[in-house]
Image (cartoon, grey):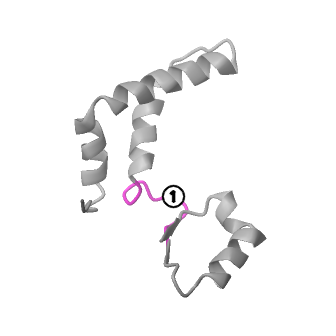
Amino acid sequence: MLIWDNVRLHLTAGMKEFIDSNGEWLTVFQLPAYAPDLNPPERIWALVERDLGNLAAADLGEITRAVERRLKGIQYRPDLVDGCIAATGLILDG
């Protein structure tokens, strides 16, 4: 299964060829260009971005470290991750 969210990689000729040549087993679900209500990672990134809004970083490394710290914090808060998934209405099996 491929969740197609219009990321540039999904729009390449190579990806189109891959989808076309594997249609017998590959199911493609195309999301709108921006669909945070259907895409749990969008909600995770919103949590990260909320904390970075006032960051006056001196360089890219500082931004990278801040993002990594925030993602690490979210990793240890399963309630936040579960909330991002639950907000989509999607059900996880297994």
Image quarter for residue 79?
top left
* Quadrant into which the C terminus falls: bottom left
Residue 4 picture location, percent across and down? 54, 67
> In this rendering, would 80 be left or right of 57?
left
Query: Badge 1: few (under 14), some or many (20 or more) residues near its Cα, within 10 Å?
Result: few
In the image, is residue 9 part of the stretch drawn in magenta? Answer: no
Count of all numbered marks drawn on residues in the image: 1
Residue depicted at 60% across the width and 21% down the height: 63
Residue 5 picture location, percent across and down? 54, 63
**Label 1 SS:** loop
The answer to whether 57 is drawn above or below residue 17 in the figure is above
Residue depicted at 42% across the width and 54% down the height: 36
The answer to whether 93 is drawn above or below residue 81 in the figure is below
Location of mark 1 (residue): 34
- Note whether residue 81 is visible: yes
Residue 44 picture location, percent across and down? 40, 40
- Note whether residue 53 is visible: no
> In this rendering, would 86 be left or right of 34?
left
Where does the magenta region start and end?
30-39
Q: Main secondary structure of the magenta part?
A: loop
> In this rendering, would 52 be left or right of 88?
right
Amino acid tagged 1: Tyr
Residue 22 picture location, percent across and down? 61, 81
Image quarter for residue 62?
top right
The answer to whether 41 is drawn above or below residue 29 in the figure is above
Residue depicted at 51% across the width and 26% down the height: 67
The answer to whether 68 is drawn above or below residue 16 in the figure is above
